Amino acid sequence: MSAVVLDGVTVRFGGSLLRRTAPFTALDRVDLTVAPGEICGIVGESGSGKTTLGRVVLGLLPPSDGRVAVAGAVPAALRGAHRRRFRARVQCVFQDSAAALNPRMSIGAAIQEGLDIHRVGDGPARARAVHDMLECVGLPRRTAERYPHELSGGQRQRVTIARALILRPEVLVADEPVSALDVSVQAQILDLLATLHAEMALTILLISHDLHVVRELCHTVAILQAGRVVEAGDVETVMTGPRHPYARRLLADA
């Protein structure tokens, strides 16, 4: 069974019969299959539909047409307890770690929040899980007592990764996870994601505009232009011999 399947997925926004305005199509008949344990890069320029695709996979946005299946579930059909369980199985790492973390919440509380919401373990077990996860992402246990403003950008991004993985999800959507970081820190975070992917058997959907990042980390890639997948396949095959003119231009500009 595939970890992520998008079959003819279209997402439209807006449009009015009274004003005679057409809806904006953010995704247009997108087909995508990601195998369990695979890291798939989603690449395209701003406005190509990358983030919309990520929101569809996370179940935050229902498709206007087509079918979406993630971790064996159809997000748009889930309600109540089933939807809550899906949230634990599919998590996200955002681009802006400063905005993603509550400045009034300690790092430990932020990471533990998922365990609290899903009622995983008792108090001492949750605290141990937080400390263990901090060590997994390369941060000392005492980081749990600190606050976001006391950490560097790279440290904050490690915290957002820890928060996403504390529930041991099957699928991780990483939306531009290193684009706001210095080049040296980017390499560290990419190495961390690669290590965690191997240790936790994660399926990762990596959204990025940086082809170098995708080539470094991903097994497969899908290139979006104006909401359509114009080229997809094995990373090396696409990178070394792109067929679509848009893909060739992206690679030439990289």
Image: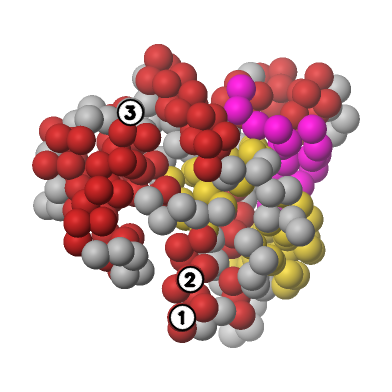
* Image quarter (top left, top right, bottom left or bottom right) of the N terminus: bottom right
**Residue at x-position 81% and y-position 19%:** 240
Instruction: Please say whether residue 42 is visible from this viewpoint.
Output: no
Kindly report the secondary structure that dominates the magenta region of the rendered protein.
strand
Looking at the rendered structure, the kind of residue marked 3 is Gly
Q: Badge 2 is on which residue? A: 85
Q: Position of residue 235 (x, y in %)?
A: 75, 29
Amino acid carrying mark 2 in the image: Arg
Nearer-the-camera pick, 152 or 193: 193
Residue occupying image coordinates x 31% and y 33%: 135
Instruction: Name the foreground residue: 166 vs 124.
Output: 124
Give coordinates of residue 16: x percent, y percent: 59, 79
Tag 1 near tag 2, CB within 8 Å: yes
Q: CA distance from mark 1 to mark 2?
A: 6 Å
For label 2, the crowd category at 10 Å Cα-Cα, with few meaning under 14, some 14 to 19 and many 20 or more, is: few
State the separation of the CA atoms marked 1 and 3: 33 Å
Residue at the disc numbered 3: 138
Using a 10 Å C-alpha cutoff, classify the residue at mark 3 as few (fewer than 14 neighbours), some (14 to 19) or many (20 or more): few
- How packed is label 1: few (under 14 Cα within 10 Å), some, or many (20 or more)? few
* Residue drawn at 19 percent across, 56 percent down: 124
Note whether 106 is above or below 136 in the view shown.
below
Find the distance from the CA under tag 2 to the CA under tag 3: 28 Å
Q: Which mark is residue 81?
A: 1
Depicted 178 relative to depicted 223: above or below: above
Q: How is the image coloured?
A: secondary structure
Q: Secondary structure at mark 1?
A: helix
* Horizontal arrangement in the rendering, residue 131 relative to residue 178 (left or right): left
Residue range highlighted in magenta: 216-234
